[in-house]
Image (tube, helix red, strand yellow):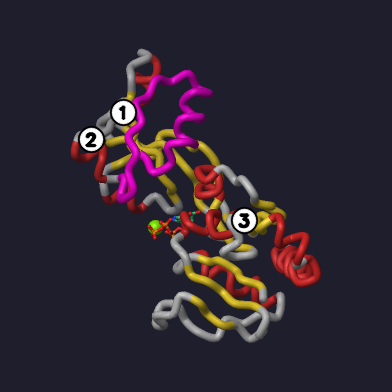
């Protein structure tokens, strides 16, 4: 049995065509089904639905043999125990710094002021500002970061941006791109050895489908 960990929403949706290219069809819709384990058209392959941030953990400890996770999530997790054979080029967005439209970020950086930054991505944010020599106090959040600058909790946020419409709706402006983000295939290192005959063709089919 091969177990693939996916999160509901865009990762699930955008992984479906890749699975199809590998001859695997998921026969149930996670948006309507209450099941957390979904069968597929291949009796030896199943999908488990987990929170996006839990995908690397499931794969690392063998709760799933493989999974699909965003680069954002993988960087925060650290990637221990994970083999990352493919950038799937799905769920694309960027990680950026955003501030309130009336906050002069460039001036604050230039003056060497301490900037309060709220984010879910503490590890990436810490590295980014350290590289730039910008002094920051990081505040870890789990939910909508856009609220932080609006309430005075923080001067800036580090968050994912795709169209920018959420930022705009909250009177925030993107002032710095940190990196481009897409999702990767992650494989449990032990499973890759023990289930090589099942996993290798899957990696090859995904890889062909991306191109
Ligand atoms: P939850 O919504 O359960 O709190 P989440 O926000 O991490 O979890 P998703 O919104 O499905 O879950 O995001 C999953 C992954 O998709 C993220 O880790 C990121 O890599 C990518 N992603 C997030 N937001 C966007 C976006 N606006 N456009 C494209 N990809 C995105
Ligand atoms: Mg989300």
Q: Residues within 10 Å of mark 1 (few under 14, many from 20)?
A: some
Q: Are marks 1 and 2 in contact (CB under 8 Å)?
A: yes
- Location of residue 107 by image quarter: top left
The residue at 39%/50% (across/down) is 164
Would you say 67 lies left or right of 162 here? right
Residue that label 2 marks: 153
Would you say 193 lies left or right of 159 here? right
What SS does tag 2 mark? loop
Residue 21's place in the image compared with 126, above or below, is below
Q: Are marks 2 and 3 in contact (CB under 8 Å)?
A: no
Quadrant where the C terminus is found in the figure = bottom right
Residue 132 is covered by the magenta coloring: yes
Q: Position of residue 130 (x, y in %)?
A: 49, 23
**Gap between marks 3 and 1 measured at Cα:** 31 Å
Which badge, 2 or 3, comes first in the chain's sequence?
A: 2
Q: Nearer the viewer, residue 118 or 209?
A: 118
The residue at 80%/70% (across/down) is 197
**Gap between marks 1 and 2 measured at Cα:** 8 Å
What SS does tag 1 mark? strand
**Gap between marks 2 and 3 measured at Cα:** 33 Å
The residue at 66%/73% (across/down) is 2
Residue 152's place in the image compared with 171, above or below, is above
Residue that label 1 marks: 116
Would you say 21 lies left or right of 11 here? right
Q: Which residues are magenta?
A: 119-145
Q: Nearer the viewer, residue 147 or 4?
A: 4
Would you say 130 lies left or right of 203 here? left
* Label 3 within 8 A of ligand 1 by Cβ: no
What SS does tag 3 mark? strand
Residue that label 3 marks: 184
Q: Residues within 10 Å of mark 3 (few under 14, many from 20)?
A: many
How many numbered markers are drawn?
3
């Amino acid at each position: 049995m091969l177990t693939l960990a996916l999160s509901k929403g865009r990762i699930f949706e955008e992984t479906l065509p890749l699975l199809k290219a590998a001859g695997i069809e998921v026969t149930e819709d996670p948006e309507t089904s209450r099941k957390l384990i979904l069968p597929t058209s291949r009796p030896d392959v199943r999908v488990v639905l987990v929170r996006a941030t839990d995908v690397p953990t499931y794969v690392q400890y063998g709760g799933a043999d493989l999974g699909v996770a965003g680069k954002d999530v993988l960087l925060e997790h650290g990637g221990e125990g994970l083999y990352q054979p493919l950038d799937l080029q799905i769920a694309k967005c960027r990680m950026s710094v955003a501030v309130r439209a009336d906050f002069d970020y460039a001036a604050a950086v230039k003056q060497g002021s301490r900037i309060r930054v709220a984010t879910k991505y503490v590890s990436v944010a810490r590295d980014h500002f350290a590289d730039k020599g910008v002094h920051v106090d990081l505040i870890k959040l789990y939910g909508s970061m856009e609220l932080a600058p609006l309430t005075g909790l923080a001067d800036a946020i580090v968050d994912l941006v795709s169209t920018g419409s959420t930022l705009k709706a909250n009177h925030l402006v993107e002032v710095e791109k940190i990196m481009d983000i897409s999702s990767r295939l992650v494989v449990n290192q032990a499973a890759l050895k023990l289930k090589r005959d099942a996993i290798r063709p899957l990696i090859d089919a995904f890889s062909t489908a991306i191109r």
